Amino acid sequence: MEKQHRCRRLVLVPCPFQGHMTPMLQLGTILHSRGFYITIAHTQFNFPNPLNFPDFNFLEIYEDVISGFNANCKAPLRESLARMMEKEDQHSKIACIIYDEYISAANMLTYQEIPRLLKDDLWYSTYVGAEAMMLELVPGLEPLRFKDLPITNFRDLDDLPQLIVNAHDSRSYSAIIWNTMDCLEQSSLAHLRQEYQLPLFPIGPLHRTIPAPSISLLKEDQNCISWLDKQSHNSVIYVSVGSIAFLDSKELAEMAWGLANSEHPFLWVVRTDSISLPESFQETVGERGCITKWAPQKQVLAHSAVGGFWSHCGWNSTIESISEGVPMICQPYFGDQRVNSRYLSLVWGVGLEWENDMNRGPIKEAIRMLMVGKEGEVIRQSAKDLKVKIELSMKQAVSSYNSLNELVDQILSF
Ligand code: UDX
């Protein structure tokens, strides 16, 4: 069966950031295992290590992406593809291009709903009007509030036309692939299926489909796994806000003391070079805390010592955590993270929403509540239940498994 597919090439174009590179390379690995040739188009900024993917081709796009990825990469990508197509033979014809865009189905749904909000004048009366309206639920998108919508700058209405064009310009694509599962986002996917007359393939969780080589743009610190091995079952709170968000120095200090006072062992990813945590903090926590610049997160979340995750709710972290049944404290920063946080806490019931200022007292309380508190019991149980549901969805003849087969058939039909 594999050999039969080998004459088709897929070109994957990930946005050059860890959170986008990760699912695209996972997808490439999965589709390669189904017999396709894979080319990864990448910029000079933030590209993966080709040595980790000896079976893939890498196509470098020479452009300055920082000043505008989409605008600046379009022409060079087109030229590179044209050169590729000139050289292609019958064994490597490009079947399709896969690019990354929307993160979760719920997130895409918000973009799709914005034109309606504009039409009803709700958008303007909310954003240009009273701040208090930000806490109002968005009609049709409950439990999202206006403040949860994934717009970078609420006041910058100039952003909107482009976002809407992107969300509605389905002429340029033939299908949408999601790193999600029907059992997780059934209602959002149903809405989107109705709206777009396109095949949608929820084939997640990608990282669990087949093992992929390391996709980390930063060096993973394996010492934290040895440290985890020494901790007891479900005792450790893992803290990471992904590859972009960060805590400022005051927030770092509050988090440090919140962790120390929680009395739980903790594994904390602090990416900043200059971590200046107070000496007394180091003395207080001793071996109870492990601080690292970059952890092997998937391994961490799968480790039996980890009982909770303080997260910014990036979509990869979300999927990785719920696939392992790890309950979360949701501290979103921007974009889709607010949507994910809302769904984690209010729809799937596996997270505790963090909306406070960063102060050590409430941080300690939230950690204790999630890890051992009575109020956290329901969340911990829901996280376990969701893991079971997700595992089931990946089994033969159930949704993600079927969607992947349908995706392969669709690509072969091009
Ligand atoms: C970005 C956006 O910020 C996010 O909102 C969007 O959903 C995806 O793109 P990022 O902030 O990096 O992503 O978060 P996330 O999606 O969680 O991706 C981070 C990835 O880095 C995860 O796959 C995680 O496993 C990995 N990671 C993170 C590590 O391997 N080690 C770490 O120490 C921290």
Image: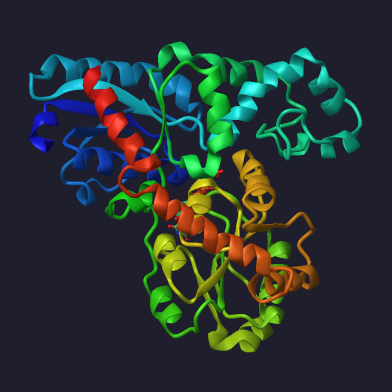
Q: Is residue 333 visible?
A: no
- Reply above or below: 230 against 117: below
In the displayed structure image, the side of residue 362 where residue 177 appears, left or right: left
In the displayed structure image, the side of residue 109 where residue 298 appears, left or right: left
Q: Is residue 17 visible?
A: yes
Report the coloring of the rendering.
rainbow
135, 45: nearer the viewer: 135
Q: Residue furthest front?
A: 397
- Reply above or below: 316 against 178: below
3, 356: nearer the viewer: 3
> Residue 225, position in %: x, y?
40, 74
Count of marks overlaid on the render: 0
In the displayed structure image, the side of residue 125 where residue 114 appears, left or right: left
Q: Quadrant of the C terminus?
A: top left
At x 50%, y 80%, the residue is 233
> Residue 224, position in %: x, y?
43, 74
At x 25%, y 26%, the residue is 409
- Reply above or below: 185 against 213: above
At x 70%, y 75%, the residue is 368
- Reply above or below: 163 against 301: above
328, 24: nearer the viewer: 328
> Residue 164, position in %: x, y?
61, 18
Q: Quadrant of the N terminus?
A: top left
> Residue 35, position in %: x, y?
16, 36
